[in-house]
Image (spheres, rainbow, N blue to C red):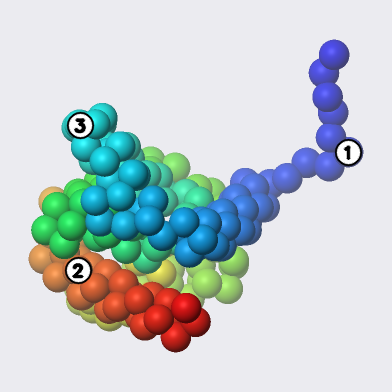
Amino acid sequence: MVLKFPFKLSNKQWIQVVTVLGILLSIWMGLYIKSNPAVFAVGGEFQLFLKEIGIFGPLIFIAIQIIQVLYPVIPGGLTCVIGHVLFGPLMGFVYNTTGIFIGSILAFLLARKYGQVFVKSFVSDKVYDKYIAYLDRGKIFERFLATAFILPGFPDDFLCMVAGMSKMSLKKFAWITIITKPATLYLYTVLTYQGIQMVHQLFS
């Protein structure tokens, strides 16, 4: 028996649905961690489990970071904090950076291959038109991309796709990403983690 739905969702609508589910999942995870702090504490059961599965722990986490760049299941800021807590400041930074870098490269390549149809699935027409206009500005777009990767408030993952539609080479995009993202990623992760800690102390 084949189930038939009375409606058909577009790619953009599916992504919106998944985004909402990701937000709900994030809220549930936050509540679960709050009610079971010992499980996720340093040296807790979950961290011991990661040690038991060896290299698969970091590989699974890196895969999650790659996916969240391409498909917004869980907010990237949250996954970075999770990596910071579970693997420590140094290795968490390495795994966060590795996953986000690979995800950014894949976003660039997918946009280059599939073009506007792929890119417009992730944002509204208004946001698309706002940032796609930078493509006609030559080197100004490169400077804008580097600035957007450094400063908060820009849709980094979407801009990786916009870059894929530009004349920028993959090599240049990779260098811009390597130079600008790691330091700011570490800073935002630490600040977000400290902010969560402060909120937790206020309400505990």
Going by the numbered disc 2, the residue's amino acid type is Tyr
Residue 6: image tag: 1
Q: Nearer the viewer, residue 191 or 49?
A: 49
Asked whether residue 162 is in view, the answer is no
> On the rendered structure, is 45 left or right of 177?
right
Q: Find disc 3 in the rendering and name its residue.
A: 54
Q: Residue 135's spot in the image, x, y percent?
A: 34, 68
- Compare marks 2 and 1 and give the one earlier in the sequence: 1
Q: Residue 63's spot in the image, x, y percent?
A: 33, 40
Q: Secondary structure at mark 3?
A: loop
Disc 2 and disc 3: Cα gap in Å? 24 Å
Q: Which of the two discs, 2 and 1, sits closer to the camera?
A: 2
Residue projecting furthest to the right: 6
Tag 2 and tag 3, C-beta contact below 8 Å: no
Q: Nearer the viewer, residue 164 or 3?
A: 3
> On the rendered structure, is 63 left or right of 185?
right
